[in-house]
Each structure stands twice: as C-alpha cells, then as structure tokens.
Image (cartoon, rainbow, N blue to C red):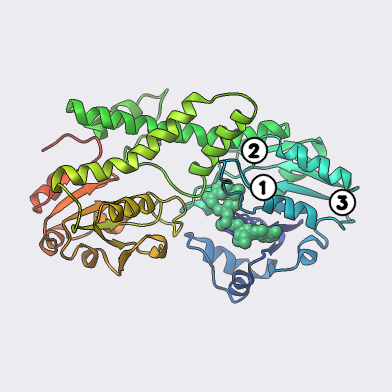
Amino acid sequence: MSRVGVFGAGYVGLVTGACFAELGHDVVVRDVVADRIEQLRAGTVPIYEPGLEELLSRNAERMTFTLEVADAVEGADFLYVAVGTPPTYSGDADLSAVWTVVDELAGLERPAVLVMKSTVPVGTGAKVRHRLDERGLDNVGYVSNPEFTAEGTAVRDFQQPDRIVIGAFAAADGDAVEELHRGIEAPVVRSDVASAEMIKLAANAALMTRISFINEIANVCEVTGADVVRVAEGVGLDRRIGPSFLRAGIGYGGSCFPKDSLALKQLAANSGYHFQLLNAVIEVNELQKRRVIGKLQQHLGSLRGKTVALLGIAFKPNTDDVREAPSLVLAGRLVAEGADVRAWDPVADGSALPRATICGDPLEALDGADAAVVVTEWPQLAQLDWRAAAGRMRNPLLIDGRNMLDPDELRAAGFTYEGIGRAAA
Ligand SMILES: NC(=O)c1ccc[n+]([C@@H]2O[C@H](COP(=O)([O-])OP(=O)(O)OC[C@H]3O[C@@H](n4cnc5c(N)ncnc54)[C@H](O)[C@@H]3O)[C@@H](O)[C@H]2O)c1
C-alpha cells in the first residue's frame, strides 16, 4: 500500500483522498484553510457531497488532515494536486495555487510522483516538469491524472469511473499511478502529458456543446411548436448520439464548465486559434439564463415591484456548490429589473444571491409570489404539493427552467406553466 499526500481539501481533494483510503492507502490531506482542517479533524465534512461523510468516517484510521506541507510530503509516494484553478480576469486558468504547491515541495528528498488532479491548461505539465528540474527535483516524477467526477455523484464516479486517464513523461511513473488505482475496474487511457490535459478539457467541452446544442434546439422548438422533451428522447435513442446531456434548460453553471470552457477558449486564442464552436457554446449558455427574464416579462410585463421565487440555488441538485450557478445571474437580473427575489435551496447557502430573501422551504418561498422559477432540479420539487403551492402565490405562474415537472399536472393544479422548449398548452 502507498502513502498519498493530497493538496487541497475541496470537492476533488476530499473525494480523491477518501477513495484512495478506501482502497487501503494511507492518505494525508493538506489544506491552507485552518477552519476546514479543524472541521475535518473533528469529523465534520465541510462540503455537501453524498456518500463522502460515510467514506471519511469509515476510513478515519487511514486519513490525516493537516495544515503543514511537511506532514503531507513526509514518506509520501504520491503527491496529488487538487487545488482550485479558477478563471483569471482574462479567462485564462489561474494556476497560482498550483505553483504554490510546486514551490512548497522545494526540500523534497525522497522520490515521489507529483500527480496533477486539478484541471490545468495543456502545457502546464511541461512547465511544472521544467520547474521541478530547475530545483533539482529530478527524483520527483510528474503525471497528469485528470478528474472527471461530477459533484453530487463524485464518490461513485471515482470508484466506478468510465476511464482513468494517465499521462506521464516517464512510463514508470504512469505505471505507479495505474497501480495506485488497483481495485478500481475501468479502462485506463495512457498518453503523453499534453494529451491527458487535453482529454479533460475536450471532454468538458463536448458535454457543454451538447447542452448548448439542445438548448438551441429548445429555443427553435418554442418558435415552431415542437416539444424539446420529446425531441430529445427521439434524438437520444439514436445509438450514435445517446441520451445523456440532452436535457434542455436554463444553461450550465458550476465550478468547472464555465471556467474550463473559458480556459480552453483562451488556451486556443493564446496559440493564435479562434475556437469558433466553443465561443458559440459559451454565448448560447449565457443567453439561455437570461431568456428566463424574457419569459417572465412576457407574462408579467414590467418586473418592477413583482416578487419572483427562485426554487433552487445550487448549480445542480445534490451539491451545495453555487459557483457560477444560474441562480446568481437570475437573481442579479431580477433585482436589476426591480423585482423582489425570494429563494429556497435544501443545502446551498444563499448568501451569494444579491438582495434575496432566503426561505427555509419551497412553499415559504412561494408566499405571495407573482412567479416562480425552477432553477435546480431538486427531487423535493417533484414531490411538492403544487396545488397548495398555487394557493400560496399571488399569481401562480411557473417557469420550469429544468423541464422537470409535468405540464399537465401543473396546469391542473392551477398554474400557468411554461418550460424550456416545450409546447404551449
Ligand atoms: N469540483 C469538481 O467537481 C471538479 C471535477 C473535476 C475537476 N475539478 C478540478 O479540480 C480542481 C479542484 O476543484 P475543487 O472543486 O475541489 O476546488 P475547491 O475550491 O473545492 O478546493 C480547493 C482547495 O484547495 C485548497 N488550497 C489552496 N491552496 C492550497 C495549497 N497551497 N495547499 C493545499 N491546499 C490548498 C483550498 O483552500 C481549497 O480547500 C480544480 O482544478 C477543478 O477544476 C473539479
């Protein structure tokens, strides 16, 4: 069994660390935020990710949490980098946390493999390799092992991945990382470092392209009288296409897609290439969020003084992550139009929403509202007593931004219902 140091106790670092501990490895997770480390030592999980709490407690004996670099590197065979790589002002990925970790390894004496889990631009591995060599750290190998897990299903995704991608400069380092995953059944894609970095960016771009594609089909459905839910079903049954990521809605958000699409766009642009398709994907997604405001205005006229309930704040269900969530754009636009915003989410913290009243349950959010928008497809909303909900509102208008509800049922419950790309009543 190996010893693994993980830098970053966020969504990826904690899941990676806990899953390696579950495979029997000793894991030390290091973060720079003292609160986070204290919580983890006390057995409290600082993020909401289904299954993670159980996994951490089951493997508590094999896991240590620390603020000290020395604890993480001591005796480590692998040093996983799982720090954030947010966008800079220009859209390029901000690699400052990655470089901090690389520089923190300065005194490393023992041979180890540095493994990049963070999503980084193509070429980062080569630069890190160069910096390691400059510091005389030729005993430290480098491997790109990008992460494909999705928040909400991250534990399952890590334990039963579609594939494990390993890009290495030296075959022995790649072999070692492959061996570290022993116990996980999945195809392994071995490649050079640059290709592994590109696989991550290209996979995300492909998923975003499908989302923007079906959203544009939905918009055309709206003006032609077709129903995108039926259209997506019929298209997705084609084996060459497949059904996933064909749900029309109010666009993608989250901590990965928006920033990774910008990073790929900038990466291409910095190399002199104009990535036209990706630019369109990003623009369609931005417009898609704003179309909701247009729909509300079509029904209500001016939104000044109107109350709009946002059902869901997290960027998707089963996570508390609100980074780049469509709810932020919607709340901002609604406030700018003069509306009052009430919002509910079962786990996400609504403090990032500008001037919204945060409510403890969906019915409370709907109290006296002129319209409601389903922003996140939380299962609680499928079970809501919509007849009672209609009675709580001043005007029972529902924009189903995720096409998760049955239009006929909602209309029978007294709502004026409008989805995204769905046939009008
Ligand atoms: N969140 C996802 O679902 C997901 C999926 C695939 C890939 N990724 C990628 O993985 C990376 C991490 O994402 P995340 O969502 O886990 O980020 P996160 O913001 O949740 O966690 C990053 C953690 O790193 C810590 N950190 C910063 N500097 C550090 C240092 N020098 N040493 C140790 N810890 C440090 C931060 O305090 C934070 O706790 C990103 O590059 C992201 O794009 C994320």
Q: Is residue 234 above or below residue 351?
A: above
Kind of residue indicated by mark 2: Pro
Q: Amino acid at mark 1?
A: Leu
Residues marked 3 and 2 touching at CB (< 8 Å): no
- Give 190 or 131, whichever is nearer the viewer: 131
Q: Amino acid under label 3? A: Pro
Of the image marks 2 and 1, the number of the one nearer the N terminus = 1
Name the spot of residue 282 as percent of width and height, x first. Answer: 44, 35
Query: Which residue is at 22% across, 47% downward?
Result: 399
Q: Percent from the top left, x then y, of residue 80?
A: 71, 52
Horizontally, is 170 left or right of 200 in the view? right
- Going 18% across and 59% down the picture, which residue do you hit? 305
Q: Quadrant of residue 355?
A: bottom left
Indicate which disc, 3 or 2, sits on the residue closer to the N terminus: 3
Disc 1 and disc 3 in contact, CB within 8 angstroms: no
The relative height of residue 243 versus residue 57 in the rendered view (above or below) is: above
Q: Earlier in the sequence, mark 1 or mark 3?
A: 1
Residue 273's image quarter? top right
The quarter of the rendering in which ligand 1 is drawn is bottom right
Q: Which residue is mark 3?
A: 111
Between the residue at mark 2 and the residue at mark 1, the CA separation in whole angstroms equals 9 Å
Q: Which residue is mark 2?
A: 121
The answer to whether residue 374 of the structure is visible from this angle is yes
Pointer 1: residues within 10 angstroms few (<14), some, or many (20+)?
some
Which residue in the protein does label 1 denote? Answer: 95
Q: CA distance from mark 1 to mark 3?
A: 24 Å
